[in-house]
Amino acid sequence: MTEETAAPQRVFFALWPDAAALDALEAAATAGIARCGGRRMGRDSLHLTLAFIGAVSPAQLDKLRNLAGQLRVAPFDLMLDQLGWWPHNRILWAGCQATPSCQRRLFDELSFALAAAGFPVDQRPHSPHVTLVRNARCAGCESLPVLETPVRWRVDTLTLAESCLQPSGARYRVLAHWPLRG
């Protein structure tokens, strides 16, 4: 298959939690399902999306790899300290009450680099979150389960992943990692 005929890949940049954070996120999902029902996200699919790019050609994929390798942001600690629910798509999520400045800087620098390289950039405000449960029905809940202990992880890697659509839902395949460095 030549580059011109290669199937486009649906890609996104994300942060992937470490093992301890994954354990805590799974516990939060269990508490959420007990309250709201729904379908738990698989452990291997828990991530925090920074930028969804969409379908790209092999040449565009190379461009994304190059720009990610040029980002200069120091590693940082991320704390997810709240649960939320979006009724329009029935997603229960874990997020930040306050976005850390280093995470905001990574998001801003990535968005700037994407725009400069001609990729579309979402204009909505950045809302850092990890989707825990799909098809949650939290309407009528007076309160969501509390994150008794905030989920913390050391973010030291930027990941480029592919979203592979399947009848059972999206599956994610990591394409590349870059260490964060200031």
Image: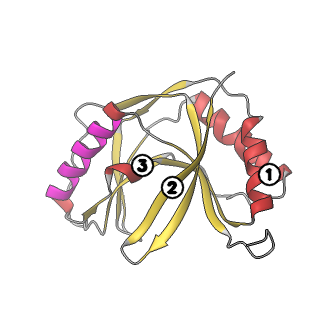
Q: Name the magenta segment's main secondary structure.
A: helix
Stretch in magenta: 21-34
As shown in the figure, which amino acid type bears the numbered disc 1? Lys
Q: Nearer the viewer, mark 3 or mark 2?
A: 2
In percent of the image, x 53 and y 63: which residue is there? 163
- The residue beneath circle 2 is 173
In the image, which disc is placed on residue 130?
3
Q: Which residue is mark 1?
A: 63
Tell me where residue 40 appears, x and y as whole percent.
27, 59
Q: Does residue 119 appear anywhere in the picture?
A: no
> Could you say whether the residue bearing mark 3 is in a helix, strand or loop?
strand
Work out whether residue 65 or residue 24 is closer to the camera in this orientation and state it: 65
**Circle 3: is it few (<14), some (14-19), or many (20+) Cα within 10 Å?**
many
* 31 is within the stretch colored magenta: yes
Which of the pair 5/98 is nearer the observer? 5
Select label 1 or label 3 by which is in front.
1
Ranked by sequence position, the earlier of labels 2 and 1 is: 1
